[in-house]
Amino acid sequence: MIQKKICILGAAGVGKTSLTARFVFSKFSDKYLSTMGVKIDRKQVEASGQVVNMMLWDIHGEEYKKIPTSYLRGASGIVTVIDGTRPNTVNVAHKILQRVNEELGTLPNIFLINKSDLEDDWNISDAMIQTLRDSGAPVYLTSAKSGDNVESSFLQLAEMLLNP
Amino acid sequence: MNVQQVPDIIFSTIAKNSFQALAPAWFEIKTNSEEILNVGGEWQHYFLEQPVAGQDVSQACEMLIGMLPMTENFELPQMQLLEHCYTDIFAIHDTNSDWLLFCDVTEKTNQLQTYQQTSNDLILIKDRLSRTLNRYVGQEVSERVNKGELKFDAAGERREISTLFVDIRGFTPFNECNDAQVVMQTLNAYMNCMLDSIMGNAGMVDKIIGDGVMAVFGVLPSQNHYTHDAFSAAQQIQTAVAQLNEQRLQAGLDILGVGVGIATGEAVLGILGTHERRAFTAIGRHVNLAARLESNARKGEILMDEATYIALEKPHALIAVTLALKDIGETQAYALLSNS
Ligand SMILES: Nc1nc2c(ncn2[C@@H]2O[C@H](COP(=O)(O)OP(=O)(O)OP(=O)(O)O)[C@@H](O)[C@H]2O)c(=O)[nH]1
Ligand SMILES: [Mg+2]
């Protein structure tokens, strides 16, 4: 069976753990328990007619402490998460990716702009989304709460990894 | 300190204690491969099944797939191998064989979690507060547009205005040593001083930024010259903060100070958005200048640019200062430091 390691990166509190929990366990909680280090979850999916075991590395947010790039050894892809209600988390995402690119080279990546259910608080401009798209990576608006676009975006990443 | 200088008895006591706390386990691995040659230490701490010689590392520990063979040393801190347990993993590249060392850091990590949680909670809470306030600011703009107090064409209108920035000094370190509720109450108390003084002097709150506010004068109708309104607002902010601090001192609470920057010049004014979510914007060279002056202002200080100083007819109490401002360069400014 094909194994793919995927690292989930982003600022603290953007919803990395929530998106993983939604994708793997179809669960969501409003309570915030900040991740320490790394927690690993797995999910089997079918992509391009093959079974893929996605190993998801849910990594702590880049706030309190920098993400060590050693976590990314052996990774096939990256999910970069942004909080749609906090524009500053876009800058954090750019910063992390730049560091990863410098140390490990570019990896297939998707951007998830999360918390799309919080419409009234939405605070990301089209121009910001465009700069993300300009990097060549697909951008999805997701909600770990409603489940909107979560499964489909992870599956899209699996497809990208199988058809480079 | 050189380990060799430590008396044996001391060294062995330290080693014994940290050994017990870390509960180390290790794999010896054949160089340039993934094959485990030997397993040692307290493997039960890290694996449900006993890893055995001859196995591949990724069979014994699935998450290490793709990490070997080793070409250099690396560390994987705080890995949750088993639920609720944190492990530091050290990969050590040696001449005869490679090593993987597993150390239990659960206790230390749980302690750190409390700090990280507090600090991250605050980031989310502060963002939420400023979003709520900004939404209120947006509603205010909408109401004023509806009442006909704000009239701009969509293309934008040029007008001379004064812009004021104010920000709490040292709020971030304060954040880190207090719990969320205390921080919220504190932020609210200081925010009120700033907002009341601005609104009481025909200022319009443009936006709330983190621990501070941007406001413009010369946009809402007023009996006074807009630069005078801005200066009055700035002085009232400092007085209100000084009074608040006096009360807080008596109540045994921490106190904070604010810095203010004011600049005057032409700006293009516009209203963005529709209905309930209107936002007012002012764009102009002096707006950035005001922001820079504010970030240079100390606790209790008001800094203003030359245009503001002249419009105020050069008040005697102000002191001329030359500042090197980021992205702007050397700038003539005028300072008023409150006596508190
Ligand atoms: N409304 C809404 N809230 C969300 C969503 N995703 C996450 N949250 C909330 O945001 C907070 C943080 O979520 P986490 O998933 O723990 O964030 P994280 O990125 O893993 O945070 P760190 O581990 O600290 O880096 C929690 O209170 C979640 O309930 C979403 O799609 N919508
Ligand atoms: Mg998390």
Image (spheres, rainbow, N blue to C red):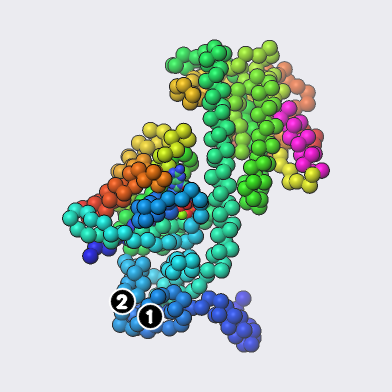
Q: Judge if badges 2 and 1 mark residues of a common chain.
A: yes
> Residue drawn at (41%, 72%), measured in percent from left and top?
B91
Q: Position of residue B161 (x, y in %)?
A: 59, 19
Tell me how far mark 2 sits from mark 1, CA to CA: 13 Å
- Residue placed most toward the observer, B264 or B189: B189
- The chain under label 2 reads B
Residue bearing the label numbered 1 = B50
Comparing B156 with B50, the one in front is B50
Label 2: how many Cα within 10 Å (few below 14, some 14–19, many 20+): some
User: Tag on residue B56?
Assistant: 2
Quarter holding the C terminus of chain B?
top right
- Residue drawn at the location 49% of the way across and 20% of the way down: B270
**Earlier sequence position, callout 2 versus callout 1:** 1
**Residue bounds of the magenta highlight:** B234-250
How far from the left and from the top, in percent, is residue B41? 46, 82
Give the farthest residue toward the right: B250
Residue B175 shown left or right of residue A75 in the figure: right
SS state under label 1: loop
The answer to whether residue B12 is visible is yes
Q: Which mark is residue B310?
A: none
Q: Amino acid at mark 2?
A: Asp
Does residue B70 appear in this view?
Answer: no
Badge 1: residue crowd in 10 Å (few <14, some 14–19, many ≥20):
few
The residue furthest bottom is B9
Kindly identify the residue that appears in the image at 46 percent across and 33 percent down. Answer: A120
SS label for mark 2: loop
In the image, what residue occupies the spot 54% across and 24% down? B139
B265 in magenta: no
